[in-house]
Amino acid sequence: MTTFDYAARMRRARVEMQERKVDVLLASLGSELPYLTGYTAMPLERLTMAVIPTIGETVLVVPELEAPRIDPIPGLFTIRPWGETEDVIAIVADLVGDATTAMIGDHTWSVFLLALQEALPGTSFVSARPLTRALRVIKEPAEVELLRRAGASADIVAGLLAQHRFSGKSEAQVSSEVSAMLEANGTDTAGFAIVAAGPNGASPHHESGERMITAGDAIVIDFGGTVGGYGSDTTRMFHVGEPSPEYNEVHNAVQRAQEAAVAAVRPGVTAETVDAAARDVITAAGYGDFFIHRTGHGIGLDGHEDPYIVAGNSEQIEPGMAFSIEPGVYLPGHFGVRIEDIVVCTDEGVERLNSSPREVAIVE
Ligand code: ZN
Ligand code: ZN
């Protein structure tokens, strides 16, 4: 298990908070807490919240019965367990004190935010997203290494799937097979596996169901699991039997679009330029209206995070940013094609974290 330098992260967080004139950061559910302390809150009705002042001691307020889960890092924070009959909002409010501005993680439940706002009428609450973005958008080498390992594990699974039997199985069955393959090949979790066959492939976030896979189906499989909290996210195409000329034309366009966008990644290029590199190829092939989502998203502790590779995002790509490149074409009622890799921007250009073949795999 990789251990990160949480004290250094905490120092960087405080510098950013000071620059933004923020007095305290409140971290609950979401990735701020694990990023800064290594501890992940349980997503339950009992509040867990780290109160991280710009100056002073960090206190992790945690339900008493969950305190034994915490592996405290000496000097990083103290633990304030709260019992079943205590008022946790009052405890947090007391720690926040007379802070003028509090940053709060986007994934904090509104029930807690609303109660804190009522208890702290003199404190204004702002989103922690700009802070966490500043801290997390450039990956540390150890984070890239975990992303690399997650990608390698997904590549092994892609190779197994190219030899796999699909016909006669439901999407849901193949989805659980993919999850089992991920766990057996290096990921810590079964992760996720979208399996969308035939016309279902035209729905990018299809929920794998009972549809039976049959001859002539194009199958979109979008999958990934985590290693040390960092995920893989890759999409490969499979076809039961020989594809139609139309399928091949679309696949070819998507594959060329994916290549073009990956090739466009280098320090200083804007996110929207990378998106356009993929989109231009698909538009030129006549399928522009059917590429209905952005080209990619950042990946780290969150499966989707900054930077977003989308038209209108003029932020520059920098070394250490990790994100997906996943153009797709979705023909309603027919099929969909998506090809997805995770890439990392390097000093020289780009490193792909997935290397399994991007051609369609003909399967049984
Ligand atoms: Zn994906
Ligand atoms: Zn993705």
Image (cartoon, rainbow, N blue to C red):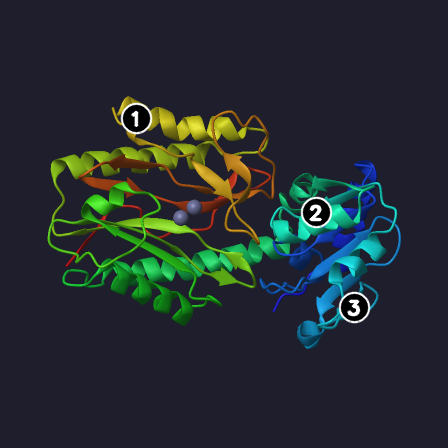
Residue 38 in percent (x, y) is at: 67, 63
Q: Secondary structure at mark 3?
A: strand
User: Which is nearer the N-term, disc 2 or disc 1?
Assistant: 2
Per the image, the residue denoted by label 3 is: 79
Report the front residue among 169 and 353.
169
Report the front residue among 303 and 258.
303
Per the image, the residue denoted by label 1 is: 289
Answer few, some or many: residues within 10 Å of disc 1's Cα (few below 14, many 20 plus, some between 14 and 19): few
Residue 315 in percent (x, y) is at: 59, 29
**Mark 2 or mark 1: which is in front?**
2
Instruction: Measure how far apart labels 3 and 1 are at the Cα level.
Output: 53 Å
User: Which is nearer the N-term, disc 3 or disc 2?
Assistant: 3
Q: Is residue 299 above or below residue 267?
A: below
Residue 76 in percent (x, y) is at: 80, 63
Disc number placed over residue 104 in the picture, else none: 2
Q: Is residue 262 above or below residue 105?
A: above
